[in-house]
Every structure is written in C-alpha cells, then in structure tokens.
C-alpha cells in the first residue's frame, strides 16, 4: 500500500507538471488523455461521465479546451442540436511532443519486465482503476 500511495502521489505531481508545461489545468489534461482513449467524438455528457464532473462543469471544461485549441466541436449527424467533441488534430501533436521524453522513460521501466510480469502489472492497474472509479463515485454521492 505504501508503494501504491507513493506511485499515486508521484503521478499526480507528474500530471500537474505536464499540465503546467502545456499551460492548461490538470483536469483539462486528464480530459484530453481520456478523449485520446475514445474511439471517436463524444458528447459533453459523455465527458461529464468520464471525468466525474457535473454537466455544467464539463461544458466549461470543453469551452476551455476549445479556446486552447485542444478540442473541436462537431454537429452530431444523428441529432444536429447536439455537439460532439473530439481532439483537435494539433492537440495530438502538441501532447505527443511533450509526452515524448517521459513516455520513453516509462517504456524503459516496462522493458525490464517479462510478458508474464507485465500481465500482472496490467491486471493490477486495471483493477486499481476500477476501485478508484468506484470509490470516487461513492465519495461524490453517486452510489
């Protein structure tokens, strides 16, 4: 548990430093990272669900990201009254440039492990993320 807490604290510091370098809020950076994992554009409601924000806060988040040139809004072909949000093409390039050196450093750490060990690490990360989401929901009154 001690190492897990140290890892989490170090990642929070890294995330904040990365956000500061990009001159965006750390929540905005996490939203960009989540959008990068999505297979296509999402609604602002989806962003609220992914980030745990209220719909109003998610709208303000998208407004900030759009102003920063990190996302684009597109009309939903199924419902023209609704907008879908996607990463701007320049956002991937901008984030990729900043992520290059840290990404290589993280890869170097992972290259020290064999496939079986990586499977255990991936399983732990997946399960820990599920616990984190469930506890965040519990703490915010979602269940």
Image (spheres, grey):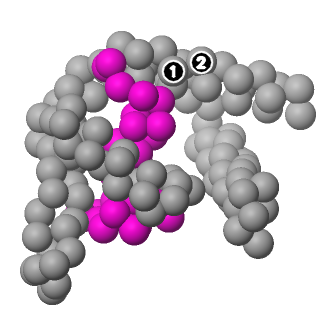
Residue 30 is covered by the magenta coloring: yes
Looking at the picture, does residue 41 appear above or below residue 71? below
Task: For the residues labelled 2 and 1, say whether their Cβ atoms are less than 8 Å apart.
Answer: yes
Q: Which structural element holds mark 2?
A: helix
In percent of the image, x 40 and y 37: which residue is there?
28
Residue indicated by mark 2: 13
User: Please, which residue is most extreme toward the front here?
Assistant: 56
Instruction: Name the one closer to the observer, 124 or 108.
Output: 124
| Quadrant position of the C terminus in the picture | bottom right
Instruction: Name the one closer to the observer, 27 or 90.
Output: 27
Of the numbered discs in the image, which one, if any, rests on residue 16? 1
User: Please, which residue is most extreme toward the bottom here?
Assistant: 78
Q: Which structural element holds mark 1?
A: helix
Please provide the residue range marked out in magenta: 22-49
Looking at the picture, does residue 59 appear above or below residue 70? below
| Quadrant position of the N terminus in the picture | top right
Residue 109 is covered by the magenta coloring: no
């Amino acid at each position: 548990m001690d190492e897990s807490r140290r890892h989490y604290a170090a990642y929070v510091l890294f995330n904040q430093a990365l956000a500061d370098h990009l001159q965006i809020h750390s929540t905005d950076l996490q939203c960009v990272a989540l959008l990068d994992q999505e297979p296509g554009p999402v609604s602002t409601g989806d962003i609220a669900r992914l980030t745990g924000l209220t719909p109003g806060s998610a709208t303000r988040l998208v407004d900030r990201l759009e102003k920063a040139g990190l996302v684009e809004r597109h009309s939903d072909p199924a419902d023209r009254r609704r907008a879908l949000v996607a990463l701007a093409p320049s956002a991937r390039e901008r984030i990729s440039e900043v992520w290059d050196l840290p990404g290589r450093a993280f890869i170097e750490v992972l290259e020290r492990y064999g496939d079986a060990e990586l499977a255990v690490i991936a399983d732990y990360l997946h399960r820990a993320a599920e616990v984190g989401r469930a506890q965040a929901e519990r703490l915010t009154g979602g269940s």
